[in-house]
Image (cartoon, grey):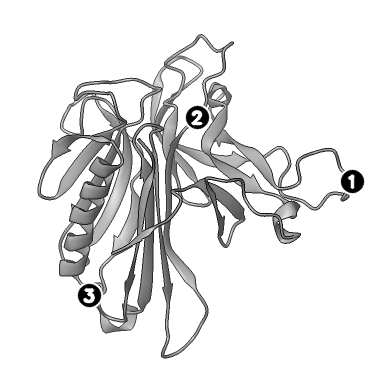
Amino acid sequence: MSSVGFTQAFATGEFTDTAMNTLFLALKSQFAAAGFAIILDQSEAFEVLPAGHLAGTVSDDIPHWRIEMIGGSYPTMRARAIWGIDDNDKDSRTSHALYLLNADMQPEWASERAVTFAADGAAGWWWLISKQWNAANPEGIWFESIALATTTRRYAADMHPGLACRYGLFDGSDWRTPYVASEMGEPIAMAAGTLWSPLCGRVRPENSPLPRLAAPMFCEIDNSPGAHVQGEVEHLMKLTSGYTWGEAPMPGWWAFVSDFAAFALPAPASFTPL
C-alpha cells in the first residue's frame, strides 16, 4: 500500500457549492484508495481510520479523522481530529475544526484555485493545501487553507498513555488535538498549541555538522505540563537553510513554503490531475 494524491484546478468562479460537493466525494474516494477505513459514511460527513483498524477502535496512538460539509449561506468543508468511537458518541472528544475549503458564493470572493491532496492509510497521515490567486488583478498567491493531519511519535521510554491524544491537525501555525491532561489528570478538550523545531530553520555555517535541510518538529501545547510527552511529529519536517541553498527534500517528501515557514510533507511519487 502506498500514498496517493491528486491536484485539481478551478477557474475564477468555478468553485461553487456543487463543485465542493463533487470534491467532497473525490476526497472520500481518495481516502479509501489510500487504505483508510471509512467508519462513518453520511451524506454530509465521513470519518476514517488508518488501515487495519475497525469501527469502534479508540486509541491515543491511532488517528481518527472527520471530514464534514457545512451548508447554509456560506458552504464550507472542514476537518476535525476525533478521539472516540465516532462524532455521535457522547464520550468522544474532538479537536477544534480546521476549515479546508469555502465555496465561491460571492463574486468578490471568486478567484482561481488549486487544491492538492495526499494521503497514506498505512502510515495514517493526510494533508490538503488550497492555493488561490486573482488572474484579473494579480496580488500574488495566498493560501485558503493548510491542513496537515498527522500523529506524534511515542518514545520507547514513554509508558504513560492517556496524557495526550497523539494526533492532531496543523494549519501551518497552530496544532490542534482532541485533548491533553491537566495537572490533576483531567482531560482538557480541544487543546491547541504550536509546533517547534530544535534547529528553527535558521542559517548556519556551511561546514556545520548538523543536517542542513530538514529538522524534526515537536508539539508544544499551551498551559499543559504533560503535553511534551507527545514527542516528535511523524509526518512533517521543518526545512532549514539548506533549502534556500538549493538542496532538495528527501525522496518521498514534498517541499511546501507557507507564509510561516518552509516545511516538507510526505507525498506520492506523482499527483493525479482531476
* Type of amino acid under label 2: Thr
User: Crowding at label 1, few (<14), some or many (≥20) Cα neighbours within 10 Å?
Assistant: few
Residue at image location 70% in from the left, 48% down from the top: 213
Q: Where is residue 171 in the image (x, y as percent from the top left)?
A: 46, 51
Residue at image location 21% in from the left, 72% down from the top: 16
Between disc 2 and disc 1, the foreground one is 1
User: Crowding at label 2, few (<14), some or many (≥20) Cα neighbours within 10 Å?
Assistant: many
* Type of amino acid under label 1: Asn
Among numbered discs 2 and 3, the one appearing first in the sequence: 3
Among numbered discs 2 and 1, the one appearing first in the sequence: 2
Q: How far apart are marks 2 and 3 (CA)?
A: 37 Å
Q: Where is residue 157 in the image (x, y as percent from the top left)?
A: 59, 10
Among numbered discs 1 and 3, the one appearing first in the sequence: 3
- Residue nearest the viewer, comparing 14 with 8: 8
- Residue nearest the viewer, comparing 31 with 2: 2
- Residue nearest the viewer, comparing 53 with 86: 53
* Type of amino acid under label 3: Met
In the picture, the quarter occupied by the N terminus is: top left
Q: Position of residue 104 (x, y in %)?
A: 26, 74
Instruction: Kindly state the secondary structure of the residue where label 3 is placed.
Output: loop
The residue tagged 2 is 152
Residue at image location 34% in from the left, 56% down from the top: 100
The residue tagged 1 is 207
The residue tagged 3 is 105
Instruction: Kindly state the secondary structure of the residue where label 2 is placed.
Output: loop
Q: Position of residue 270 (x, y in %)?
A: 43, 55
Residue with the most extreme bottom position:
136
Q: Distance between the residues labelled 2 and 1?
A: 31 Å
In the picture, the quarter occupied by the C terminus is: bottom left
Instruction: Kindly state the secondary structure of the residue where label 1 is placed.
Output: loop
